[in-house]
Structure formats: C-alpha cells, structure tokens
Amino acid sequence: MGASLSIDLASQRYSHFGIIFLPEGSRTPRVLMPKELGLKDPPEAASLAVAIESLARTANVDVVLLDGPQAWRYPQSPIKHMRLCERVLNTPGKTGIPGQAKPSTYLTYIQFSIDVFHYLRAAYGWSLLSSDWPQHSGRRWVVEVFPSAAWALLGLDRLPGKSRGAGLEPWRRELAQVTGYSLPSNLNHDQLQAAVVLPLGPALIEGAADQVILAGLDPFIEGDSLYEGLIANPRLPPN
C-alpha cells in the first residue's frame, strides 16, 4: 500500500486549489495547504510537478489524482471539439486539438493541467492510466479525474457550484459515511472535490479493477503531442 494525493487544480491562484493527502494504510485524509508544499503564486506547472514529486518521495505517494485534462483531442477524432471522455462525462470544459478549448476561457486552465501531467510523466516517470492498468503493478500513477461525476457515481447528490454559496457540511458528512473516511471538518468546495475521488487511490494501488470506472481512450503520443486519455472515477466496493 502507498499513499494517495488528490488535487483539485486551478490556474490562477494556489488558494483555489484543493489538496487532500491520504497516508499509506490510513482512512483519515489530511488537508494540505499549498504553502506546506512550498508553492507560491502564480501557479506554474513545472514547480507544481516538483512539489508533487518531492512529497511523493518523502511520503510514499503512489497515486496522484488531478482534476484536469491530461492530453488534447485527437485531430482525426469523429467527435467534434472535445475528447471522448469529456463527451461521456459531459464536462463543462472541452479540450480541443493542441491550443484550442471550448469555451476559450478554459484554455489557460487546460494548458496548465496538460503541462502538469507532462512534467510528471516526462521528468519524473509517472505513468498515465491505460485500460490494462491492472496488469502493471508497481507503477506510480498520475490519473485524470472528474469529481463532479464522482458524486453521482458514489450515489450522492452532486456538490453545488461555488456561486450558490450552499453550506457544504451535508456533503462532507454523506461522503464520509459512504467512503468510511474520517474527513476533516470545514472542508471547502475545492477540498471536497479533491476528497470525493480519493477512493481511487487505494483501488489503483491494490489492483481493484471493480472499484475503478474508466471513460475515454487510452492516451497515446503522435508527433510532439499527447492525445485523448482516460478519466477515472471511483466505484464503491460491494458490501
């Protein structure tokens, strides 16, 4: 068993990140603040990758979950304007061919996320999830997630948008109940989004394929670009 790290990404300020760490063998996740990882604004992909790798080495992290795209839409895809995984899960932001996104306001965030995946993979040897992942034990996985879909897949109401200003304690309490995690109190929206996908970490480490739901296409490189990719979501183990 290794530890897991889940990050709800943002591209403007680290204060908009949600970072949750699940220690090895523990059911008590811990909130990490960006300054604990040595991160200072503005967010920068290479320095974030350095911080993730440093924590991984010291805390035995084997799975990193990132709420953001890992790759671009394949130009020859019959699906217009987005990757297959985004069509399946109806994500609000659509990743286009390199340098394009819909709506265009998402491009900075999408480029930032893709760059983080790139640095972790190319500079530090993290593996991108593929459909045959259970056959590759011992790898360190960096995994694309979509927390908004995870709530429904765990049988819970989707977390309301930040703009609604709803009290979040009911969602924290229900998430703790279904996962069995002792979640810290007063989690904010970004931290809850990071927490809801945490069951993926132990499932991937243990090779529990029945607890992992995949959408999309295996990532692949063509020319100088990485394309498509799988989004993973958690499934609760059978009672």
Image (cartoon, rainbow, N blue to C red):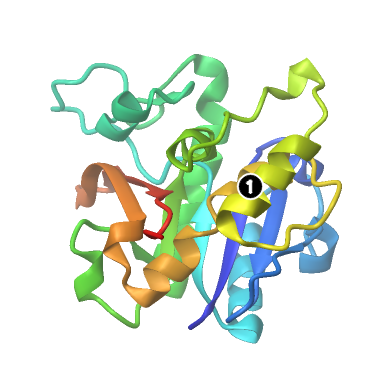
Which of the two residues, 189 or 238, is positioned nearer the viewer here?
238
Looking at the picture, does residue 188 appear above or below residue 82? below
| Residue at the image position 61 percent from the left and 67 percent from the top | 52
Looking at the picture, does residue 159 appear above or below residue 153? above
Q: In the rendered image, which quarter is residue 164 located in?
A: top right
| Residue at the image position 22 percent from the left and 51 percent from the top | 221
Q: Residue 63 at x, y = what percent?
A: 48, 68
The 10 Å Cα crowd at callout 1, few under 14, some 14 to 19, many 20 or more, is many
Residue under label 1: 175
Which of the two residues, 124 or 142, is positioned nearer the viewer here?
142
Q: Residue 196 at x, y = what percent?
A: 58, 48
Q: Residue 93 at x, y = what percent?
A: 47, 23
Q: Is residue 46 visible?
A: no
Q: Is residue 235 visible?
A: yes
| Residue at the image position 66 percent from the left and 44 percent from the top | 174
Callout 1 secondary element: helix
Image quarter hosting the C terminus? bottom left
Looking at the picture, does residue 3 appear above or below residue 152? below
Q: Is residue 95 left or right of residue 109?
A: left
Which of the two residues, 32 or 101, is positioned nearer the viewer here?
32
| Residue at the image position 64 percent from the left and 52 percent from the top | 177
Q: In the image, what residue type sits under mark 1?
A: Leu
Q: Residue 95 at x, y = what percent?
A: 39, 28
Q: Is residue 164 left or right of residue 226?
A: right
